[in-house]
Image (cartoon, coloured by chain):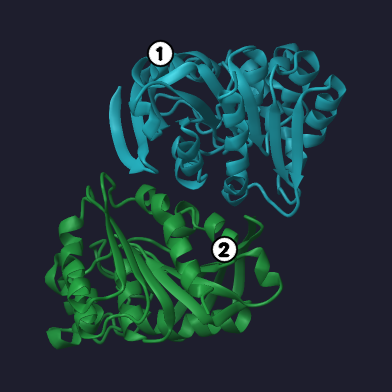
Chain colours: A cyan, B green
Amino acid sequence: METVSENACFGGVQGVYTHASEACGCDMTFGLFLPDEARDGPVPVLWYLSGLTCTHENAMVKAGAQGWAAEQGIALVFPDTSPRGEGVADDEGYDLGQGAGFYVNATQDPWKPHFQMWDYVAEELPRLITGNFAVDEERQAITGHSMGGHGALTLAMNLAGRYRSVSAFAPISNPTASDWGRKQLSAYLGDDESLWARHDASLMMREAGFDGPVLTDTGTNDQFIDLLRPEALAEACAARRQHATLRMQPGYDHSYFFVSTFMEDHIAFHAEALYAG
Amino acid sequence: METVSENACFGGVQGVYTHASEACGCDMTFGLFLPDEARDGPVPVLWYLSGLTCTHENAMVKAGAQGWAAEQGIALVFPDTSPRGEGVADDEGYDLGQGAGFYVNATQDPWKPHFQMWDYVAEELPRLITGNFAVDEERQAITGHSMGGHGALTLAMNLAGRYRSVSAFAPISNPTASDWGRKQLSAYLGDDESLWARHDASLMMREAGFDGPVLTDTGTNDQFIDLLRPEALAEACAARRQHATLRMQPGYDHSYFFVSTFMEDHIAFHAEALYAG
């Protein structure tokens, strides 16, 4: 693992690191914010999964998360959204291939050799981070934006017991039923739709739910709202009697101006779960 | 004036607008954050001047300022750092020409026809903004980063009575005595150094001072600190008995991770002055 940069930030350190990923078969880069409290021992951690076209960097510079994480003594991890590099398959579309890993393990060519983002985010990167930094593997929470909200919700519901809380900003909520989803799930996983179900937050909510609190925010002016299908997740949460707060925010769109506006609430929400008991 | 974008943000609106600038002889773009309170009437305003290589966009997306401005009911203006476009002179260096207007009125060719950033920021843009938005021209304050800190300090001291308070993040403090300054001032203003003096915050502090409070933050690990010369401004402030708080922040560098860390303090500082009396 190599240090790309480390910047003092809100009393802690915003680092960027690169490492040879076994899961993805290429070098991967991630951001890690460690609050001052990490000098004294392991701190709780909030994972932030980014959306289509993003790298590790977007949320790190635009979400305004570090100040609130510093206040709560929580680390933040910002993984990349896909494998990258010259030998890595790509597509002309912004919503497939590099920058669009969709947090699944691809079983189909040409994606299979590198696009193993589920394993990367669920297994390899947590091991790397808890093994090398003062981050407490017993106190993890997860959030994300758009495609990253999809990733956060599906990881949380599939990996029972891993995360104490899950939240999302404008998550892709029902990808098996929208163009942000069917395209990618068929490309990465093939045509057997039964294999897609665990990667659909609304279906997983019906099937499994989440053993902890759920928070989502979506803007009423989100330009992609028809692709996000928040109504499917809302219906599934209510049907399951899931402990959840699903908010529609008047006037907000899909941008980081929206994400940063509600970041304080999300970090406070996770802090409550991370410091409980 | 045309609207480029408007995004809901912390209860207010983050807008981007473009207009034909008379001062600069080209189209100019600026960002304007209006808090919710601007619906009910004019609000105080804080100008944020950016540094070398920046556009109107950098601070708007990376400084984390809107949340604190919303809390205080203050508007934020993010001007560009230079004229731009095909007919506008430029230089190979990152620190001269487009992206590096230095907040002066150029008297030398090839810069003179467009590089009139002093007039743009001091006269034209304030007129445009107070004429078109609910912004109170009687309650203005100014801040900036690096080259923009230089701009903020020199505008504030030259335009007595205009701004109630001035602050700066890692300002270029003594440009007549450093390579971030001598190069640009000679290119834009010519070789007569007597004409440079009003564009040097440390010289202006000795000469005129500021009729209000001053706040600066500079990181002890700032990679450009030898070019910033905070010691010159510190000496001049103390010699003048200027009402000022000049802070050196251990471990911080020149990045927006530094700027965003101390943004809350700067906006609270300006709010106190803007809401006094």
Residue B211 lies in quadrant: bottom left
Amino acid, disc 2: Gln
Residue visible at 30% across and 37% down?
A: A5
Q: Taking the image as drawn, is residue B204 in sight?
A: yes
Residue B64: percent from the left, percent from the top?
Answer: 49, 53
Q: From this view, report whether residue B77 is shown above or below residue B169.
A: below
Circle 1 packing at 10 Å, graded few (<14), some (14-19), many (20+), is some
Residue B50 placement, left or right of B232: right
Residue visible at 70% across and 71% down?
A: B39
| Nearer to me, B88 or A236 | A236
Residue visible at 43% across and 84% down?
A: B162
Residue A188: percent from the left, percent from the top?
Answer: 61, 20
| Residue, disc 1 | A22
Residue B15 placement, left or right of B103: right
SS of the residue under disc 2: helix
Label placed on residue B72: 2
Amino acid, disc 1: Glu
SS of the residue under disc 1: loop
Circle 2 packing at 10 Å, graded few (<14), some (14-19), many (20+), is many
Distance between mark 2 and mark 1 Cα atoms:
49 Å
Q: Taking the image as drawn, is residue B58 in sight?
A: no
